[in-house]
Image: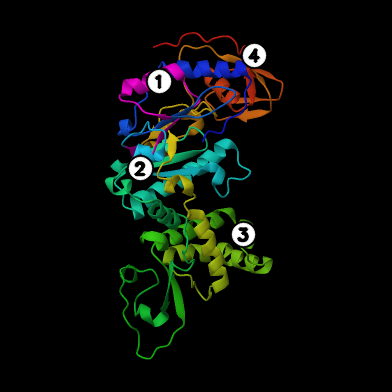
């Protein structure tokens, strides 16, 4: 649910009026089959108790509620019910539920130490992998049945409303999550061991014939050492994903140099001497580039040690694991943020996105509300702030007074980082 800073009554009232100005100036589109869904909301009040079991018979009725109430957080159920306004789950009579994936920057590996904006950039990248590799890739959902949404806070939601997904049980949904996060995946799954003689005359490692599956035989009785060949990067499922991630790691090491490669291999479990030796081979001697070109882990005279192979492929798994919030996906009664509403912890819009828009989406630039016709706001900072990627880049020290755009004032206020100096003054009416 919504993560909200505690605000004093005058500040709450000021923020509430900004939300009212927003909802009275736009038309929030209801979700599909909305008359079968439960709606819930948190009001702007010191005691933020959730108001649940609401339902709406028309889009105008929903919009009227938002304009009048202007709640701090608005949710709707992923589930469809025969009686969505009933007070108990049994009385609601469950009919089915969208399949929801929630990827939150707070839960991502490598997010520690990053700024808010940097965490969202990381979350967008991982969310793109979740959508492309899993939802549209391995699971085969049609893009028309997958809706993408920026949560307005720290993550992204994918709503799958394909008919085949609606009646999945919690257990079946958990199986999808476990596949995404790599439960039970062997780090060696992307490697196939073959013998040197199996390549046959005239075939080099990674040639077109070999990638097509041809395995001509060498001289009878030839006994050569086995070599390890990676799955092609476009191979389906985890084998191809592991190869792509290993390639990304090796490319990063080529760009970052021996020191970066040695450091990351030590972090993956290699000793300092082994990490240094292999960093020099892979980066300085160009072996990493040859692995990427030939798909073979046996480059030149190097016998890739199994322990180091495990470490590198395990690191590859970390790079690609879909870090999705499992309880959201497995809960067939889940409440999820209403697209088009405002997030009560940031004032950012909960924005629906197309797949193409996701590539270009920058939350700090595209999600703030544009309060057209409303003047800027003077705020007193309650802590140091530094948000260079907001539409009006904002930086200041605690106790400093700044004049900022209304959307930035709302953002800082809802995060508990500033307070409007004239919190009691109502804003002018927005332009229609």
Q: Earlier in the sequence, mark 1 or mark 4?
A: 1
- In the image, taking residue 61 as reference, residue 373 lies left or right, namely right
Q: Which mark is residue 65?
A: 1
State how far apart marks 2 and 4 are (Cα).
44 Å
Image quadrant for the C terminus? top left
- The residue carrying pointer 2 sits among few (fewer than 14), some (14 to 19) or many (20 or more) residues within 10 Å by Cα, namely many
Residue reaching furthest to the right: 399
Q: Residue under circle 3? A: 258
Measure how far apart labels 1 and 3 are at the Cα level.
60 Å
Which residue shows up at 52% across the image and 66% down it?
287
Query: In this view of the protein, which residue sits in the foreground, 323 or 354?
Result: 323
271 versus 54 height, above or below: below
Q: Which residue is mark 2?
A: 98
Badge 3 or badge 4: first in the primary sequence: 3
Residue 139: x and y in percent read: 34, 53
Q: Which residue is mark 4?
A: 421
Give coordinates of residue 423: x percent, y percent: 61, 13
Q: Are marks 2 and 1 in contact (CB under 8 Å)?
A: no
Spatial CA span between label 1 and label 4:
30 Å
**Element type where label 3 sits in the image:** helix
């Amino acid at each position: 649910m919504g993560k909200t800073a505690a605000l004093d009554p005058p500040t709450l009232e000021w923020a509430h009026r900004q939300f009212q100005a927003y909802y009275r100036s736009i038309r929030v589109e209801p979700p599909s089959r909305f008359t079968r869904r439960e709606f819930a909301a948190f009001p702007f009040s010191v005691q933020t108790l959730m108001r649940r079991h609401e339902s709406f018979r028309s889009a105008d009725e929903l919009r009227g509620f938002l304009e009048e109430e202007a709640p701090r957080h608005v949710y709707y159920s992923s589930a469809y019910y025969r009686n969505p306004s009933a007070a108990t789950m049994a009385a609601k009579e469950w009919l089915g539920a969208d399949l929801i994936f929630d990827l939150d920057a707070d839960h991502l590996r490598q997010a520690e130490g990053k700024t808010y904006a940097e965490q969202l950039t990381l979350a967008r990248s991982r969310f793109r992998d979740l959508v492309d590799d899993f939802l549209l890739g391995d699971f085969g959902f049609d893009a028309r049945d997958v809706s993408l949404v920026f949560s307005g806070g720290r993550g992204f939601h994918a709503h799958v409303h394909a008919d085949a997904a609606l009646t999945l049980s919690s257990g079946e949904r958990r199986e999808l999550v476990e596949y995404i996060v790599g439960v039970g995946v062997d780090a060696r799954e992307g490697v196939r061991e073959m013998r040197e003689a199996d390549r046959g005359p005239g075939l080099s490692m990674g040639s077109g014939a070999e990638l097509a599956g041809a395995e001509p035989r060498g001289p009878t009785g030839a006994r050569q050492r086995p070599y390890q060949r990676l799955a092609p990067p476009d191979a389906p499922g985890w084998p191809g994903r592991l190869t792509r991630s290993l390639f990304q790691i090796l490319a990063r090491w080529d760009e970052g140099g021996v020191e970066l490669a040695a450091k990351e291999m030590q972090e993956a479990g290699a000793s300092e001497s082994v990490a240094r030796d292999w960093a020099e081979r892979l980066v300085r001697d160009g072996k990493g580039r040859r692995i990427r070109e030939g798909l073979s882990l046996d480059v030149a005279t190097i016998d890739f040690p199994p322990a180091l192979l495990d470490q590198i492929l395990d690191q590859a798994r970390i790079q690609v694991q879909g870090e999705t919030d499992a309880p959201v996906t497995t809960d067939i009664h889940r409440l999820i943020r209403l697209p088009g509403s405002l997030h009560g912890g940031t004032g950012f819009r909960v924005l629906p996105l197309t797949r193409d828009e996701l590539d270009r989406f920058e939350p700090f630039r595209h999600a703030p509300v544009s309060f057209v016709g409303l003047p800027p706001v003077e705020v007193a900072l309650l802590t140091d702030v530094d948000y260079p990627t907001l539409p009006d880049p904002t930086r200041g020290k605690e106790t400093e007074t700044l004049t900022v755009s209304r959307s930035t004032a709302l953002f800082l206020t809802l995060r508990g980082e500033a307070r409007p100096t004239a919190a009691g003054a109502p804003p002018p009416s927005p332009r229609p």
